[in-house]
Amino acid sequence: MGKIFSLKYSQYFIYFINLFFALFLFISINNSIISTITTFLFIFSILFFIIFKIFHYRLIFKASNFFVISILFIYTLFIFNNYLYLILVFLLLLLDGEMFSFLVNISDLLTNYKLISESDKSILRKNISRKFFREFFVASFSAFISVVLIASLRPIEIFNPLFSVFVFLILSIFLVYYLKRFFL
Amino acid sequence: MFSLKVFTIVVSMLILLSVGSLLRNENLLFLSIPLFVYLVLMANFRKQLILDLEIKRQLEKEIIREDDELRVRLDVFNKGSDIDHLYILDSLQEGIEVVEGSNVMLFSIKKGERKTYSYVLKAGEIGKYKLGPIIVLASNSDGSQSLRKVYEAYASIKVSPKISLFGEIKLMPKHTKPWPGDSVSRSIGVGNEFYAVIEAKESDSIRRINWKATAKTGVLMKNSYNADLSSDVLLILDYRAVNDIKYKKKSLLLYSSRATLLISYRLIRDKHRVGLLVLGEEPYRIKPSFGRKQFDRILYAVIDSEPGKLSDLRLLKEYVSFLFPVTTQIIIVSPIIDFEIAIAIAELAKKGYQVTVVAPSPFENLPYEEMDLADRIIRIERENYLSLLRRFSNVLEWDIEKALDVELKRASEIWARSFR
């Protein structure tokens, strides 16, 4: 049992837990269109997982998990009609994807975890916990700001089409500004 | 350069906005906001990442024995910016196992800081192993920027076989050299093997006198012995690519080189002069000599050998006879799976060389019925070649599962009977 629950399999745990939740939602919710879409996503995900097991190319495994997260996202849209819940679940999924990606990146290190010295282990634990904390903080803060932002815009919600265009334009301008300023 | 994460977030956000606008679904539009906020927060907390590292790898030793451990130390000096997550992977060749520490490490490093970490590795099989390149992935804590760099820092380690327990090899050389050794020669001299009772000379030691024979004959008689002398031995390692056959996931060449090293070590220890000829891409030769240094030369030559396609094996007899006198005893280590090598050995024997063949068997010890048709055909062909070679040379068909020294000892007893 100790061997199965070792750190080196943590990426697989996350993947299969996601897959289990997705399957649970797939079975419980009956909607022909969503079921068709998610069936394809399931097939892609499992196919990508098999390809990853053959070629050991990490990006493929990340893509496989991305499909499962997409399934969860689609069902989230279907289950929750309240945007506050939606935002929270959405950020949770983002956090899930990010941590999964991080664990996949350091999977070689986790494989050798038992062999490394205590000082190296503490350095590693410190780095991983810092990453987790940082991601959690950013995601929580994003959720908070988003909720405040949307709540402040709520009166405009009655002008539904106009609001869509407004949000689209504002976000596009900010997006271009930030991409140019910080990333490009 | 922004990372895949930023790209995914931007694309997801655009998809949500587009689909939300098309379907007039406000939930989808709202969902693009947290992504945007997330991106803005990432951008605001972001620091410019400069990846400029100086990485040095230090090895405890360059050569180790199989199953011995070797510590590798990596020294990292950061000349660039602060790095929140520095992921270093020291690539290891297949066959190397990490037994302590890790060849992969994740840590944060500040500008001008130096960090050192080490790991211990073990190589199970003899040969030459390559370490490197060192792959470095640097990213800031939010993962918005990541840089990858490959440092072309290579090192190699050589793994020699464990040879301390290898048993004695009884050679029966036709031609011996005058210096003392461990091989029983046909000439009379100082040794342990009783030869005959002969008439003693005045110069002989009184301890050698056989008093019973003297009493019977009335002449001073003495026991004479076969002299223990040494000989010149040439080891030929067949390292052609054609012999690169997998036996239980390991190359047969590995077994051949291992056998060559074990035999050479033992022969050198038994005071023989040992030379080497490797038949790889090009023939590589080491002149016969004595001593530990000679073994090191052989070891380096065998480990550095690369399997290749030797152009013409028929020239082997010319090459060997040109470089090594006919008094040299030849030991060939080859699985004998092709006709060319069988003919080459036959021609060497025809030239007058005393040839011994050590043939590692590429087949598991299975009955014919359980083998594939192709394997069955190759096995029958190989047995034909071996029976051809048995006519003019000593052949040991070595089952890899069994200890070589035990097999050699058993075979040499049989050869010794025919030699007498």
Image (cartoon, helix red, strand yellow):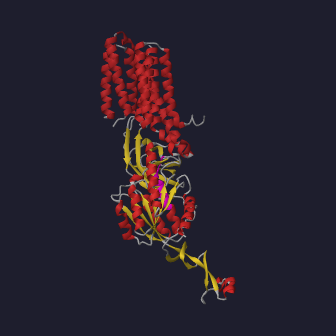
Residue at the limit of the structure toward the front, as seen here:
B217
Q: Residue at x 45, y 50 (%)?
A: B380
x, y percentage for residue A67? 42, 25
Placement of the C terminus of chain B among the 4 image quadrants:
bottom right
Residue at the limit of the structure toward the top, as seen here:
A158
- The segment highlighted magenta reads B249-261
Q: How many marks overall? A: 0
Q: Is residue B26 above or below residue B282?
A: above
For residue A178, what is the image quadrant?
Answer: top left
Asked whether B254 falls inside the magenta stretch, the response is yes
x, y percentage for residue B173? 50, 70
Q: Is residue A3 above or below residue B167?
A: above
Majority secondary structure of magenta residues: helix
- In the figure, is residue B221 to the left or right of B251? right
Q: Is residue A58 above or below residue A115?
A: above
Residue at the limit of the structure toward the bottom, as seen here:
B202
Between A148 and B27, the one lying in front of the other is: B27
Q: Is residue B43 visible?
A: no
Q: Residue at x 51, y 19 (%)?
A: A24
For residue B28, what is the image quadrant?
Answer: top left
